[in-house]
């Protein structure tokens, strides 16, 4: 149940990002649900490999390169889905930062509502 609630809230967060920033567009709530699922899968499967491969660059930039990796995941999700569009890499960077902030708030709220 907790996973489904988190998924719905992350989809709503994606709609909020699309509403706040014009560089990100989501067609509907259903499209946001699918986009949140694809983002979750990319962040679970692809992101760790990219973090490992780019570790020297991440170390040199004191972790700032992780923003680029997050933006790449956001952009990749928009590339895979027709109903989720990102205008370019800068839009992906801004959208991923906004989405990450929303996800952080959702995670804190979920932890308070559903303590482990």
Image: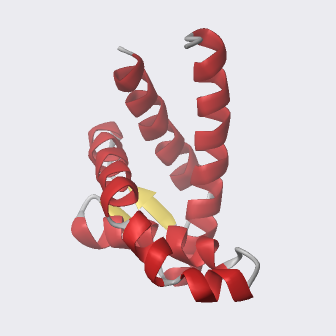
Residue 26 to residue 62: above or below:
above
Answer yes or no: is residue 86 visible: no
Relative side of 114 to 33, left or right: right
Position of residue 95 measured from the top left corner of the image (x, y, whole percent): 57, 63
Q: Quadrant of residue 7?
A: top left
Answer yes or no: is residue 104 visible: yes
Q: Residue at x 33, y 44 (%)?
A: 28
In the depicted view, which residue is nearer to us: 96 or 87? Answer: 96
Position of residue 19 measured from the top left corner of the image (x, y, whole percent): 56, 50
Position of residue 22 measured from the top left corner of the image (x, y, whole percent): 56, 65
Q: Residue at x 36, y 53 (%)?
A: 44
**Colour mode?**
secondary structure
The mark tally for this picture is: 0
Position of residue 94 measured from the top left corner of the image (x, y, whole percent): 63, 68
Residue 90 to residue 11: above or below:
below
Residue 53 to residue 102: above or below:
below
Residue furthest out toward the right: 62
In the depicted view, which residue is nearer to us: 56 or 2? Answer: 56
Q: Residue at x 52, y 67 (%)?
A: 70
Q: Quadrant of residue 91?
A: bottom right
User: The C terminus is located in which quarter?
Assistant: top right
User: The N terminus is located in which quarter?
Assistant: top left
């Amino acid at each position: 149940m907790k996973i489904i609630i988190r998924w719905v809230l992350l989809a709503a967060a994606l709609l909020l990002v699309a509403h706040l920033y014009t560089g990100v567009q989501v067609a509907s709530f259903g499209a946001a649900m699918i986009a949140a699922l694809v983002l979750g899968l990319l962040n679970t499967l692809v992101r760790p490999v990219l973090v490992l491969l780019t570790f020297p660059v991440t170390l040199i930039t004191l972790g700032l390169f992780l923003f680029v990796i997050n933006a790449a995941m956001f952009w990749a999700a928009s590339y895979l889905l027709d109903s989720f569009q990102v205008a370019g890499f800068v839009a992906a960077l801004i959208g991923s930062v906004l989405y990450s902030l929303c996800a952080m708030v959702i995670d804190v709220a979920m932890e308070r509502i559903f303590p482990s």
